Image (cartoon, grey):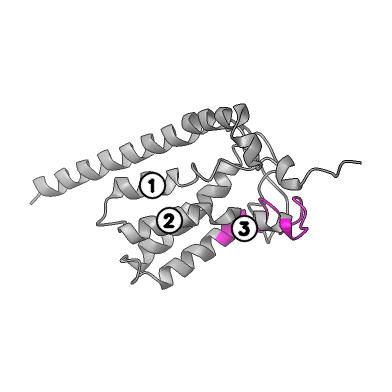
């Protein structure tokens, strides 16, 4: 008798680890190194993928639907605020002001759950944990959910996921970054013309 498939081969993932960094990269690069240092940018990339460490729970026997399971507590907005607060404590080594470190890292971490809410698979995101264990999706779910199985990812399903992420994550992030960059340049010109 065949053994049941491992949960990692069944569960839809998220936007891949390749796409979660799109948000902090777009914002950080657009704001420039005077606002977001290289160290803070790197910390933002790490914060954007940090919530998916919850997949370790599969190996520990924690079910997907459990509050400690995939897309559970680690994807919640209060956790993103906590991660931002930790970054603020390390603002010096991050070569940043405390408020900037807090906001940038909290936003990078929160963007993970928000992007997951746009996927077309899984159980949703426990965005309000610990106030609620309810899981949420956005009304429109346009991002193709990625399989956790590497075997399935490196095939037609993975290509479909990458195309979806290009369209719904990377292009909007690039547009956001470009808009922020243009706004920053316009502000700089206005500030220069009033002197």
Q: Which residue lies furthest to the left in this view?
A: 195
Residue 30 horizontal side relative to residue 1, left or right: left
Q: Label 3's element?
A: helix
Residue 8 horizontal side relative to residue 82, left or right: right
Q: Is-magenta flag for residue 123?
A: no
Q: Label 1's element?
A: helix
Considering depth in this image, is 112 or 128 the residue closer to the camera?
112
Looking at the image, residue 166 lies above or below residue 99: above
Return the mark for residue 134: none
Q: Label 2's element?
A: helix
Q: How crowded is mark 2: few (under 14 residues within 10 Å), some or many (20 or more)?
A: many
Name the residue tied to disc 3: 74
Q: How crowded is mark 1: few (under 14 residues within 10 Å), some or many (20 or more)?
A: many
State which quadrant residue 56 falls in: bottom right
Q: Residue furthest front?
A: 1
Of callouts 1 and 3, which one flags the residue occurring earlier in the amino acid sequence?
A: 1
Return the mark for residue 25: 1
Cα separation between marks 1 and 3: 21 Å
Cα separation between marks 2 and 1: 8 Å
Looking at the image, residue 58 lies above or below residue 137: below
Where is residue 131 drawn, in percent x and y? 69, 60
Image quadrant occupied by the N terminus: top right
Instruction: State whether the magenta stretch is mostly helix, strand or loop.
Output: loop
Considering depth in this image, is 38 or 192 the residue closer to the camera?
38
Q: Residues within 10 Å of mark 3 (few under 14, many from 20)?
A: many
Name the residue tied to disc 2: 44
Give the residues in magenta.
Answer: 59-79
């Amino acid at each position: 008798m065949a053994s049941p498939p491992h949960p990692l081969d069944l569960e839809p993932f998220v936007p891949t680890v390749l796409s979660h960094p799109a948000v902090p990269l777009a914002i950080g690069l657009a704001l420039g190194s005077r606002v977001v240092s290289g160290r803070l940018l790197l910390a933002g990339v790490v914060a954007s993928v940090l919530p998916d460490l919850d997949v370790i729970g599969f190996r520990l026997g924690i079910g997907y639907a459990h509050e400690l399971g995939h897309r559970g507590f680690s994807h919640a907005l209060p956790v993103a605020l906590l991660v931002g607060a930790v970054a603020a404590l390390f603002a010096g080594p991050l070569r940043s002001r405390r408020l900037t470190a807090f906001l940038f890292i909290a936003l990078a971490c929160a963007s993970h759950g928000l992007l997951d809410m746009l996927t077309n698979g899984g159980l949703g995101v426990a965005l309000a944990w610990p106030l609620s264990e309810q899981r949420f999706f956005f009304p429109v779910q346009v991002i193709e959910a990625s399989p956790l199985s590497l075997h399935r990812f490196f095939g037609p399903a993975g290509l479909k996921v990458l195309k979806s992420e290009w369209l719904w994550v990377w292009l909007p992030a690039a547009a956001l970054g470009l808009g922020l960059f243009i706004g920053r340049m316009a502000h700089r010109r206005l500030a220069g013309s009033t002197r």
